[in-house]
Amino acid sequence: MSAVAVNQVGYLLSGPKRATLVTAAVEPLTWQLVDDTGRIAADGTTEPRGLDVSSGQNVHTIDFSAHQHAGAGFTLTAGDATSHPFRIGTGLHRPLLADAMRFFYCQRSGIEIREDLRPGYGRPAGHLGDRDVPCAPDAGDHRLDVRGGWYDAGDQGKYVVNGGITVWQLLHAFEHRSGLADLALDLPESGNGVPDLLNEVRWELDFLLRMRAPGGLVHHKMHDLAWTGLPTLPHLDPQPRVLRPVSTAATLNLAAVAAQGSRIYRKYDAGYADHLLAAARTAFTAAKSNPLRYAPVEDTIGGGPYDDDDVRDEFYWAAAELYLTTGEPEYADAVLSSPLHTADVFGPYAFDWAATAAAARLDLALVPNALPGLDEVRASVLAGADRYLGIQQASPYAIAYAPPGNQWHWGSNSMVLNNLVVLAVAHDLTGEAGYRDGVLEGLDYILGRNALNLSYVTGYGTDYAENQHSRWYAHQLDPGLPHPPKGTLAGGPNSGLQDEVAQARLAGCVGQFCYVDDIESWSTNELTINWNAPLVWIAAFAAELG
């Protein structure tokens, strides 16, 4: 592993260009930028940064931002260490954007994955029996057609709250980033007059609509009755499937993304937009008029619990999306009366499936609307962005994430990326270059400028994660099966070390080192739909700049 950590994909001509050197030296060292012919293209001295808390390493920063010439095969050398090769140029992130978004087709349930559309990943349709799924004994006595949707992660369950935040983020990218309406994803629906991204998201949105129980509330999740082993392809899964109980959180997730979807799909399918808005209204009313229902913490057999005992943020988020789509006073009042509307919602990480208030805040700041107090809403986003930017500037690895006590969360890579989304929105609101550069430099961490010198995106860089926890992308266990598709994000360092492989191999790890690229390490190395979604969002932002 090289002591010079770089973005292994490359750096934009007009963006920041920095690397991190691990060294025992305390004085500045000479560095050289060398092109693919061996010519020294630039040189300078490092900036000693001292001890990096996130890794426990003594590090220096190499800043070669002044180099403005394009090329491939550049390397950085400092002392006796040389980096992996990288590019400097334009157009670096459009392929990453496309591959990160193409990931979702391979996650589809209930449809054949066509080999001609995804060479090496073709498989029969999985879980066709999801057309008629019974409730578990504690979930009701009805049956539902809950076909379709995306498999959530390395398992084959389908979860409304994780699907909800994923749909929101992909639609948010479509609404606020350029170049996504013509992004070609090679889907069965391609060419139907609807942008491919919206075609793909509709596969999940339609599943979320099917998860509605009689009475208007929404089932939290559906999955196997018991865990299956690795590997298990979807069409070979022998387990019965069941609906788990309804929850307030799931109901409000549907309300939020159906309302958001209504305004975005209206240009392409007015009938579908009307259907979504009606579903959003019904779900919001059901959530308000029924007692609060939480997903139980102990519901861990056959699927993850996705438990959440605070749904004030989901109420705020759903009200915000309904207001932004309809402009109606009822929803404006719900937004303004929420205790979260004036709260600081930008914590160590901005948002995820269990913390959705920032999703509301970002859309309120960006989508044109007449809500009173918009200046304060936008100022709160800038304050959150300034906090993340300060954290990033203090980090020798330029990470806009510093969890309390250096205890990294499960799925930390998605949290890094979601914090970068806040920086990008701040750039949208102000045009200030510091926010833009923060996003680009933050992406460096994901693509190799980290303590492990590893790109966390499959197929991108010289050394990259390729054994993410999955029941069907299981090449590590069965050479006849593929690695995850190009563009798949690994979960990343997780101080919790909840799985046995991580516990055996990473005991005593510090921050960034709490990761192993092993298929059995589900707590550090899983893949999930809601982790690839922020990769799509940030890649779209970077592609605009490039």
Image (spheres, rainbow, N blue to C red):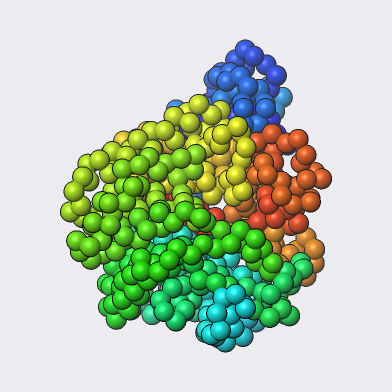
Locate residue 437 relative to residue 363 in the image: left or right. Answer: right
Kindly tell me whether residue 97 is visible in this rendering: no
Total labels: the figure holds: 0
Question: In the rendered image of this protein, does residue 48 appear above or below residue 109?
Answer: above
**Residue 320: percent from the left, percent from the top?**
30, 57
Displayed quadrant of residue 24: top right
Which sits in the foreground, 196 or 523?
Answer: 523
Displayed quadrant of residue 197: bottom left
Question: In the rendered image of this protein, does residue 135 appear above or below residue 307?
Answer: below
Locate residue 203 relative to residue 259 in the image: left or right. Answer: right
Kindly tell me whether residue 518 is visible in this rendering: yes
Image quarter in which the N terminus is found: top right
**Residue 134: percent from the left, percent from the top?**
59, 83
Q: What residue do we see at 52% from left, 68% from top?
A: 220
Q: What residue do we see at 69% from left, 75% from top?
A: 225
| Furthest residue in direction front, as rendered | 291
**Residue 503: percent from the left, percent from the top?**
78, 45
Q: What residue do we see at 74% from left, 70% from top?
A: 228
Which sits in the foreground, 271 or 333?
Answer: 333
| Furthest residue in direction top, as rendered | 27
Locate residue 500 relative to residue 71 in the image: left or right. Answer: right
Question: In the rendered image of this protein, does residue 101 appear above or below residue 428?
Answer: below
Q: What residue do we see at 80% from left, 44% from top?
A: 505
